[in-house]
Amino acid sequence: MNLSSSSEPRLKLRERLRGATRDAILEAAAAVFSAGGATQTRIEDIAASAGVAVGTVYNYFEDRTALVNALLEARRRDMFDALDAAVSSTTVAAVDKTHRGFEAELERFVAPLARHFDANRALLSVLLDEELHRGIDAKVASRRHTIQQEVLDRAERLMAKGIRSHALQKGDPAVYAALLVGMIRGVATSALDRPEARFADSAREIVRVFMKGASR
């Protein structure tokens, strides 16, 4: 009798069950956070919604911050796919004397960042609340730096296109990228303090102000 072959299906079943439990916890967390009062949501609330014991949640996620980051990680994939599409699109700014072609590309770049913020405002508020009370650990800080760098890298490629097509003044694409991303982060931080504010409403203004300062 081959014991290894008989144990393999059990291992795969166990992995599927673990994956299903993790997904159920994440789905429950997303629903509970979105229902309102995200910063007051407790792990107990999420466990009850998922139909599992509180200890089960902690078996998969160290704390509420880890759970929120897991949710955001999955949702960032769509955001980065949209950013990649915006950066890789063929620019028409070179033949557009008003630079409207590049400006439209810039809008397509800012839009997914705005959508991600507006869709995940409750989760981002939880992270901000946790950091205010507990600080930010090295692992979270490192991951955040990586995400910011990925956004900056894509923005830099877009800025290089704008310079080559003469839509932007000659300059360092990395500096232009830092200026653009800095504006985006500033607006996002401000919007978190104003529950009625939507990032999407400010996206066009970010592009307008950036182009006013950087365009030829």
Image: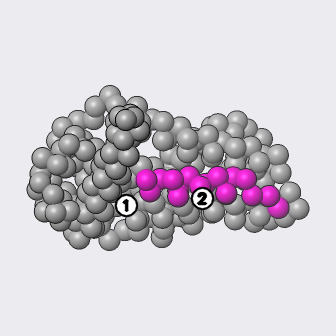
Amino acid under label 2?
Ala
Residue 169 or 36: which is nearer the viewer? 36
The image position of residue 135, as x and y in percent, is 23, 35
Residue 8 or 216: which is nearer the viewer? 8
Q: Is residue 170 left or right of residue 18?
A: right
Residue 132 or 74: which is nearer the viewer? 74
Give the spatial CA distance, label 2 vs label 1: 16 Å
For disc 2, the marked residue is 82
Q: Residue 206 carries which label?
A: none
For disc 1, the marked residue is 120
Q: Is the magenta stretch mostly helix, strand or loop?
A: helix
Q: In this view, does 143 lie to the left or right of 68?
A: right
Magenta-drawn stretch contains 90: yes
Q: In which quarter of the image is residue 136?
A: top left
Secondary element at image label 2: helix
Please give the range of residues in magenta.
74-92
Residue name at image x 56 percent, y 63 percent: 111
Instruction: Mark 2 and mark 1 in contact? Answer it, CB < 8 Å.
Output: no
Amino acid under label 1?
Asn
